[in-house]
Image (cartoon, rainbow, N blue to C red):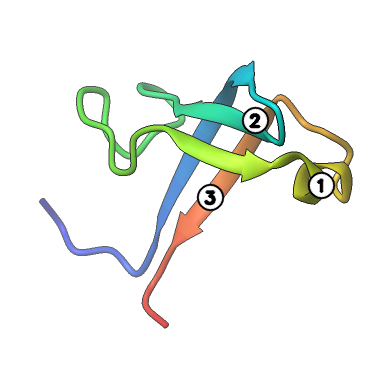
Amino acid sequence: MPERDKIELVFQEDRKTLRTVKFDEVLGEFAWSDRDVAVGPLYVQKQALELIGNPSKIKVTIEPA
């Protein structure tokens, strides 16, 4: 696999819990791989999502610090 400077992942809302929203990584056209997930399920605090308009899809970027 070629080396990259960053990986961009797209997540789709799966379900809401009491204080969080569970997102599942999207595979395929917008994902880094059409077969494998890089992160798996992602739980985000509802309070944080309110700051960006409560989206049903989010993008996460992984890059070296």
Which disc, if any, is residue 12?
none
SS assignment at label 3: strand
Check disc 3 and report the residue beneath it. 60
Q: Is 29 rendered above or below residue 38?
A: above
Looking at the picture, which amino acid does disc 2 mark? Val
In this view, 5 is above or below 51: below
Label for residue 21? Answer: 2
Q: Which mark sits nearer the N-terminus, 1 or 3?
A: 1
Return the mark for residue 47: 1
What residue is at 87 percent from the left and 43 percent from the top? 50
Mark 2 secondary-structure assignment: strand
Classify residue 49 as left or right of residue 43.
Answer: right
Q: Residue at x 51, y 35 (%)?
A: 10
3 or 2: tag closer to the N-terminus: 2
Amino acid at pointer 3: Val
Cα separation between marks 3 and 2: 15 Å
Front: mark 3 or 2: 2
| Contact, mark 1 vs mark 3 (Cβ under 8 Å) | no
Q: Position of residue 8 (x, y in %)?
A: 46, 49
Apparent side of residue 44 relative to residue 3 in the rendered image (left or right):
right
Nearest to N terminus: mark 2 or mark 1 = 2
Inspect the image, locate mark 1, and give the three-letter code of the amino acid beneath it.
Answer: Gln
Camera-side residue of 9 and 20: 20
Question: How dense is the environment of label 1, judged by Cα within 10 Å: few (below 14), some, or many (20 and up)?
Answer: few
Residue 6: x percent and y percent? 38, 63
Residue at (28% x, 63% y) in the render = 4
Residue with the most extreme front position: 18
Residue ranking furthest to the top: 15
Tell me if residue 50 comes above or below residue 62 in the rendering.
above
